[in-house]
Image (cartoon, grey):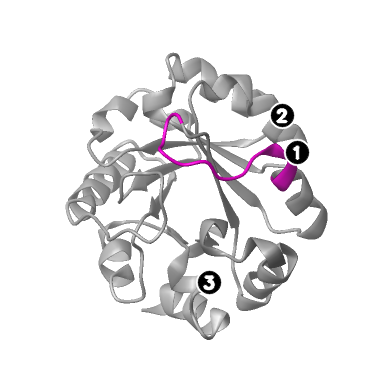
Amino acid sequence: MIKISPSLLACNFARLEEEVRKIEKGGAHYVHVDVMDGHFVPNISIGIPVVDALRKITKLPLDVHLMITDPDKYIDDFAKAGADIICVQQEACIHLDRTIRYIKDLGKKAAVALNPSTNINVLEYILPMLDMVLIMSVNPGFGGQSYIQYSTEKIKSLKKMIDTMGLNTDIQVDGGVTVENCHEIKAAGANVLVAGSAIFKAKDVKKAIQQLIEN
């Protein structure tokens, strides 16, 4: 099943609740929350108070992507704020096994994101512990970037690894996902698509979500 996780990075934050209602009615499966600290990535976005506010206005699972240095310090706070899925960057974690175990111990789904140049082999031993792997198909930090083409082969390789190990781990893709290229991404093995501009900048949000699922 293809699931859509609209990225709030592209929404109108002055009308946050209204924007969330749009994607709820449009058939979104998750709410993707990009947390940036201005250190791990060259941008600052939103944090714990916004996740807490979102939890109060929607029943959709909150898919929280921590693009931050030393995420271990904040995992507990994001869990308490209402995150359902907590995704950490492999490159930001010194002891990834420990970090993932802590997320799971909190009763949350655990995911790991890989930057474009990071090899999927870094997940070989930890993959059975993960609920989801996020393939970054742009360099993280800004919305509206174009899809990095070699990401498709990376998705295929990850899918092969998951199948070989007999796992059901979700493959999420974030960065430059559009109605035009989503078929290629899904055919490679991805089943969770993150899209910001393609959804929130669309004239018809529901139609955009349906096209991402069906194209």
Q: Position of residue 29 (x, y in %)?
A: 59, 63
Q: Label 2: which residue? A: 77
Please name which of the two marks, 2 or 3, marks the residue nearer to the observer.
3
Q: Is residue 23 left or right of residue 183?
A: right
Mark 3 or mark 1: whose residue is earlier in sequence: 1
The amino acid at mark 3 is Phe
Contact flag, marks 2 and 1 (Cβ < 8 Å): yes
Q: Mark 2 to mark 1: distance in Å?
A: 6 Å
The reply to whether residue 1 is in sight is no
Dot 2 falls on a residue whose secondary structure is helix
Label 1 crowd bin: few (<14), some (14–19), many (20+), radius 10 Å: some
**Residue 149: image x %, image y %?**
18, 57
Quadrant where the C terminus sits is bottom left
Q: Tell whether 171 sits left or right of 14.
A: left
Residue shown at 33% from the left, 41% from the top: 162
Rendered image quadrant of residue 139: top left
Can residue 152 be seen?
yes
Q: Residue at x 47, y 63 (%)?
A: 196
Mark 3 nearby-residue class (10 Å; few <14, some 14–19, many ≥20): many
Q: Position of residue 54 (x, y in %)?
A: 74, 53
Label placed on residue 81: 1
Q: Circle 3 — which element? A: helix
201 relative position to 150: left or right? right
**Alpha carbons under labels 2 and 3: distance apart:** 28 Å
**Residue 44 colored in magenta in the image:** yes
Three-letter amino acid code at the position of disc 2: Asp
Q: Nearer the viewer, residue 151 or 204?
A: 204
Q: Where does the magenta region start and end? A: 39-50
Left or right placement of residue 109 versus residue 189 in this view: right
Mark 3 vs mark 1: in front: 3
From the image, tell me which residue sits under label 3.
200
Residue 209 coordinates in the image, percent (x, y): 50, 75
